[in-house]
Amino acid sequence: MQSPVRCTHMNCPIRLGRGHGIRFRAFSLSCLLLLALAGQSRAAELPKTTPLGILVDRVVPMADLHELDGSPDSPLSGLPRWRQTLHELQRAAERDLGWQAPPRGRPDQYFMTDKNSALSTVPLGLIQARYERMAPDGSLRAGDVFALTSMQPTIHDGGSFAFVLPQATIFSNGSLPAMAYTLDAGDGIGPRPLIPGIPVPVSYTETGVHHITLQASLNDGRTLTARTPV
């Protein structure tokens, strides 16, 4: 019987038979990656609870949440980055936020017809939440996430349709209450009021990439901005 091979990194429990098709070197690299992601020494220092309930130090940062802070110059957020942002916030939360991520592909339950105009609708998704991050001195620092996406990044329904922001695709932990939204679809009309669940007609005269901008007026007097391409 062939003796097993054990990874020697930090007493890793992975064992392989010498006849296994996967090379030992690949498993050694995998062990190093797992240890890096685990961050055991850092995790022991993280508080179990925080005032906002979302501590992003608990997850591997890939979405650069600090960039999507709702400032006027915040970057565009396409659907892949938006989904990663949603995933990181869910994983960083101390409890279940009750967020149901929209399915991949065309989420038909969010597509509907405006009964008044018979326009096809394209749903938007909005992440509107606050989180906390550990500072070098061990204190907690709060940050905002305000990220927008179109659930259908490429639109083939013609130049005229409607955007809609369903209540089901507003992901919030209640820490950034908004009094009102406005939407600028980049169609030359400018900003107009956006009420969740109510379609906003849009008409593009040219094909290509358009940038849509959503702004939220908060109860504390601030205005947050999010943009996404379609």
Image: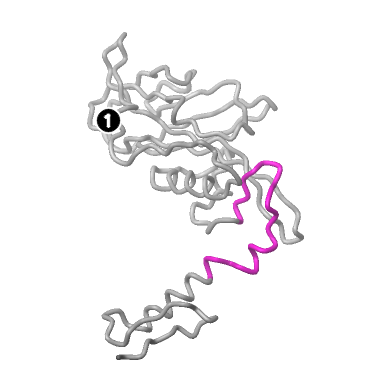
Which residue occupies 53% across, 52% down?
A: 64
Locate residue 134 relative to residue 98 in the image: left or right: right
Q: What quarter of the picture does the C terminus occupy?
A: top left
Q: Considering only vertical position in the picture, is 165 above or below 53?
A: above
Residue 115 percent location from the top left of the image: 30, 10
Q: Where on the picture, by quarter, is residue 41? A: bottom right
Q: Considering only vertical position in the picture, is 92 above or below 189?
A: below
Task: Identify which residue, 58 or 190, lies in the foreground.
Answer: 58
Range of magenta residues = 36-57
Task: Identify which residue, 88 or 122, lies in the foreground.
Answer: 88
Residue 75 percent location from the top left of the image: 49, 45
Colour convention of the picture:
one colour
Locate residue 210 relative to residue 12 in the image: left or right: left
Instruction: Name the residue furthest front.
Output: 1
Query: Looking at the picture, which amino acid does disc 1 mark?
Result: Glu
Tag 1's secondary structure? loop
Which residue occupies 67% across, 64% down?
A: 44
